[in-house]
Structure formats: structure tokens, C-alpha cells
Amino acid sequence: MPRNLALIDCNNFYASCERVFNPTLEGKPLVVLSNNDGCVVARSQEAKDLGIKMGVPWFQIEGLAKRHGIIAFSSNYALYADMSNRVMAILASFSPSQEVYSIDECFLDLAGFERRGFTRYGQEMRSAIKRWVGLPVCVGIAPTKTLAKLVNHVAKKRPQFDGVCNYNDLSTDEIDALMGELPVSEVWGVGCRHSAHLQQIGILTVRDLRQASPKMIRKQFSVVMERTVAELNGEPCLALEEMAPAKKQIMSSRSFGRPVFALDELAESVASYMSRAAEKLRRQHSLAGAVQVYVRTNPFKERDPQYSHGMILPLAEPTDDTRRLVAAAIIVLRRLYRPGFAYAKTGVMLTEIIAATQRMPTLFDDTVGMTRSKNLMHAVDRINQAYGRGTIRLAAEGLDQHWKMRAGRRSPSFTTCLAEIPIARAI
């Protein structure tokens, strides 16, 4: 049997999450802003129709927002992550083979579900997610990942498909006409640079790329683009990755809500970011062999003195212990710090990452100490998972954290904080 994959993608995910617990937002233009309420990172369809572009600074469109009643929210990543987990758990019940591709989309292998009818099965997915989570999704079904992404886009943009586009239901003429209407930039993996190059050699539409010579494409671009052409012709080249590969680098950084001058406050931010990075490290059962820290001022304030610098510190032994990683990061920060600057951002990165099972024992291993460290970190992670991030944290992270980013427009954490769970009352 030929392979068939479904790509399920949440529509305007961040904006849709905000609407789930506030039905009065339906039909109204809304945007979600980046850290410190800086730029637009998500838009409802109504906001898109008003010409709001992705990444535009909020201060540039505040006048437009007032005229058209555009509602702005600060990013609420805890809510979005929890809603994503709920969606992915539901979709996992529709197929034993799932690849979570991003926070708002995943692939499913539909092998064995042919008798259910793929289009009808896709509508069942949409109905279940809308009913149980409250989010709208669209489904694209095709023999390859690239085609599934493409027909998912079609399902979103063309109402006649009612949110589900099944490539197998389209005739040869319909496929040819559809691909002739879509610009080549809509193909998964074809970015702005490749799109411009393709247009220069006369490849303007998806159909043009599909009909291009694979050898010519490989010569002018790469083997990756050659595989894209094969996938557009229904030849599977990209496997379904049911297990996400472990990250080789883990980074954590944020801009401050106000300028920071003191070393102590910078140290609090670095400790906080490193704790988060260490948590991610343990989640993928890895160890880090080096720590990188960087600091910078605000490059947009050209009249202020500018300073930006980073440094890497190799560790004596790879570790996942938050205490050791934070201590190393603070050492680096003290070397980087220069007084008299208004710092706008710090960041940390864990590098030289290996699987915990790959660590080579040494003659000087402290077995008892390593066991205690492992048990302590496990306990901290379990408590924070059960009662909320930061329930237990290092004193080095500080208490008030006045430097934290601004989020004055953030909605409640409806599903991740007991004090903010919505309450339904009968009238």
C-alpha cells in the first residue's frame, strides 16, 4: 500500500489559544506580541486582513490598532505549551505513528486507516480537537511530507475543502491546475533566498518546480532541493521521525523589562536562564560539557554606550546538575561584566552535549555524590512539574526579579495555574 501522511496544523495558534477562554474575542482582530511586548509574533485572520505583518513592532501599529479595535496580548507561553500538549495527545489517539513537528503541527502515518476514508478521518480529527480543546485545525493528507504540507496550506486557504484537503481525492488535472496557481514559495523548505533563485531560472510555481529536472536542481541548489522535487512527485524521501532527536545545543535568553546596571541582577537572570536550560537538558537525558554566557546592551539606543560580549567555559566533567551549571555560568558572567553599561539582555547556552549513557567514568568519580545529585535534580523536576515551574529554585535566581521582561497584556494561565483556572457559574 502507498504511504499516506496527514499534517494537522492549528490555525493562528497563539491567537486561537487566547480565544478559547474568552469567546468575546471571536471575530475580532487580535495579535500576540513578543517578549517585552515588542513585535507581533501571531495574528488572527482578522488582523491579517487589516494588513498587519508578522514581526512589525507594536509601537508602529498602535494608531492602526486604535482605529480598528485590534486587541493585543503579551505572549503566554505556558498556556500555549499546555494547549499544544493537549492537541498532540488527542492526535496521538488517531494513529500509533506521530511526529510532533512544532508547537502547533504534527504528522500522522495513516497506514491501516484506509477503510475509514481519509477525508472523513481528517474531519473526525478536526471535530475532536475543536470539541475537546476548542482550537480550529486544518488537515492535509498526501503520500509525502512535502505534499501534505502543501495541501494543508490549500485546506486553510480554500473554503471548498472544509478544512481537509486529501491529495488522493484530486484528479490529475486538478492537481496540475492547483500547483500551477501556487507560487513556488509555498513549498515546504523553499525560503526567500531559494525562491528568488528559482524565479531567476524561470521556476515560478509549484508546478514548475515539480516538472524541473532533478539533476539540474541538484546541481544548482542541493540534494535537499532534489528530494523536494521528488516529494512533489509523490516519491517519499523524508521519513516520519517518531522520536525527536536530542538537541546538540540548548539556549535560554530573554530581554529585560528595564535596563540593568548591577552585577547582582545580571547574575539572577543568568542563574534563572541556566536553571531553565538545565531542566531541558535533563528532560532529554543528556549532559553538557561546556557553558556559554553572553551579555549585551540595547543596540537600538545608539546614543548609549554599547557593549556586547560572550565567553565559553569548558567543564571538568559533563553534568546536568543545575547547581554546577549555574556556578560555572556566574564565573563566566563575572569575567564578562563591565560596570557603567545599561544591559538589555543576557543569555546562556549549553554545548558539548552528550547522552548521559555516553559519559565515560573516571578514576576520580564520586559515585555517592553523583547519585545524590541525580536524586536531587529528579526531585526538583518532579516538584516543579507537579506544582508549577519555579516552585523550587536556587536562591541565586533571586526573589523579586525586577529585571524580568514586561508582559502587561498577558492573559491568565487558565490551564497551568490553580489560582487562574476559569470558573463557570450558573446564572
Image (cartoon, rainbow, N blue to C red):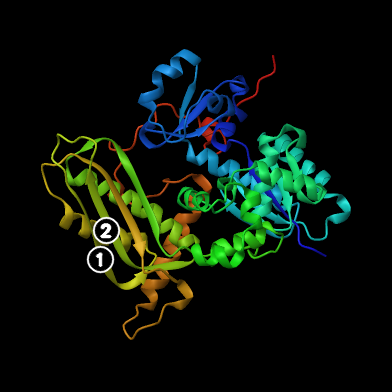
Helix, strand or loop for disc 1: strand
Q: Compare residues 328 and 12 and report the one nearer the observer.
A: 12
Q: How many marks overall?
A: 2
Instruction: Decide: is 145 above or below 82.
Output: below
- Direction from residue 33 to residue 16 in the image, left or right: right
Q: Residue at x 32, y 61 (%)?
A: 325
Helix, strand or loop for disc 2: helix
The residue that label 1 is drawn on is: 313
Q: Amino acid at mark 2?
A: Ala
Q: What numbered label is drawn on residue 329?
A: 2
- Direction from residue 397 to residue 21 in the image, left or right: right
Q: Amino acid at mark 1?
A: Leu
Determine crowd level at label 2: few under 14, some 14-19, many 20+ residues with C-alpha closer than 10 A. many
Q: Quadrant of the N terminus?
A: bottom right
Please provide percent x and percent y for residue 279: 43, 56
- Direction from residue 11 to residue 194 in the image, left or right: left
Question: Which residue ends up furthest to the left in the rendered image?
Answer: 340
